[in-house]
Image: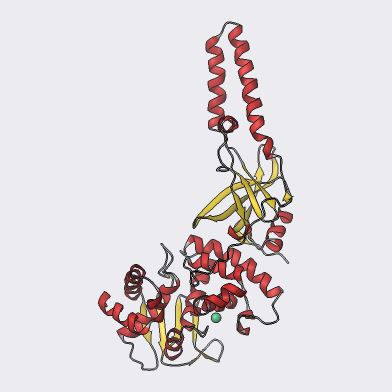
Amino acid sequence: MISMNEIYNVLLLEFPYFKKINEEKRQLLCKRTQQFIDGTDFIPRKGMMLTNRMQILIAACSQQLTLGFSRHYNYAYFEKIIVYPEKYLSTYTDKYHTGEMNTAGIIVLSWEDFYKGISIDNDTHNVGLHEFAHALEFMDIANKDVDEIFSACLDKFTALADHYLLHQPDKPLFRSYATTNLSEFFAVATEYYFEAPKEFAEREPELFDILRKAYQQNTASGISVAKKINTTGKSYLSDNVSSSKYSAVLFYLIIGAMSLTITYNGSIIGALGLVCFILVMDIFGTPRSIFSLYEDYVHVKLGQIRVKRLIQYFFPAKNRYNPIVPYSEVLYVNARYHQDDEGGGEFYSYVLCYLQQNTLVEVNCVTTDLNYERVLRFLYLEKKVGTRLDGKYKKYK
Ligand SMILES: [Zn+2]
């Protein structure tokens, strides 16, 4: 096993990213680099010598990308890295390549190009980051173990990227290769995220913001991309949830009146029984959360049992149960089809996935608009939120 000391020294000398992170992160990077080398088969080609130093730099590049992840940072699906001394002729395309991600769990790199990529850290070319970004994206699509936040963010990235590719600016930030397809767009945007963060954040703030959330590290700290949200905007999809508190009060007033009547007729035990029965039914009932779509945000009304709503009527809690989530934080909405066997017919419920203080929140909801197509289309096209239908990516044009 290569020692932590050796790894630290190599990275300090030859890995510019290492100088930009604090000591705690450096230790973490070294540890994960060591783990990655341990779990990976490095295969040299064309008679080249693959030294410790080379393995350290390649492994560190993979871990630079996932340093913000708390789990699944190790590309478990990718077990082999093939290294050529320079550009190599690919058997798939019959062209010379600098690197590739092979879906059989192999990453191929040209050492010469890889080294140039990591040592010049502000020219937006980094074949290592590019191929490892492909690897992460592939693991997400193929349902291999991948960080949950990263995975949820990719849905939103797809919606934003689709939007970008449809309305390309006259003077694009990204090199033209990015527009080849969505995967290349993601891999190239990743290179820019690490090698030209300031310009990226200024020119494409939404895309920058979603990569910041996906990689869980900020390469342009100090630049704020937060936008003020307008909470007075009109609603696109509204509902009548505001009356729910009052309905709880009314419900318990009726129960109160009924139990008083029973008491009056001589049965206190009967009255207590009724109240207990209703309370138990209520507590074990499953209240539905509801969401409403507004111009700038989604208003979530978290489902609560009637007793809680009753309490809230008398002691209003500060917005705790009704979060206002700006669209920039909503990563995806998954519409799920249900068929109710007991005569309730067919309907769609939604899983709303958003970030709240860097934590992934998933809420099961319904909304008053029964047309799921209209809901998803609006979210994808107008609000650039990722959409899924029964768990599968769903795109709209
Ligand atoms: Zn590529």
- The percent coordinates of residue 287 (x first, y second) are 59, 38
Estimate the x, y position of residue 185 in percent, counting from the top left: 59, 76
**Dividing the image into 4 quarters, which one contains the N terminus?**
bottom left
Relative to 223, say whether 116 is above or below: below
Note whether residue 3 is visible: no
Where's residue 25, x and y in %? Answer: 36, 69
Q: Say if 28 sits above or below 59 in the image.
A: above
Image quadrant holding the C terminus, namely bottom right
Instruction: Identify the residue shown where x is 66% and y is 26%.
Output: 250
Instruction: Kindly indicate the quadrant of the structure image that contains residue 388.
Output: bottom right
Q: Nearer the viewer, residue 55 or 208?
A: 208
Q: Quadrant of ligand 1?
A: bottom right
Q: Give the camera-side residue of 372 and 317.
A: 317
Answer with left or right where residue 41 lies relative to residue 252: left
Residue at 60% x, 7% y is 264
In the rendered image of this protein, does residue 57 appear above or below residue 358?
below
Location of residue 29 by image quarter? bottom left
| Location of residue 339 in the rendering, given as x and y in whole percent from the top left corner | 66, 45
At x 69% / y 51%, what residue is drawn? 293
Taking the image as shown, residue 248 lies to the left or right of residue 198, namely right
Measuring 65% from the left and 81% from the top, which residue is drawn there? 172
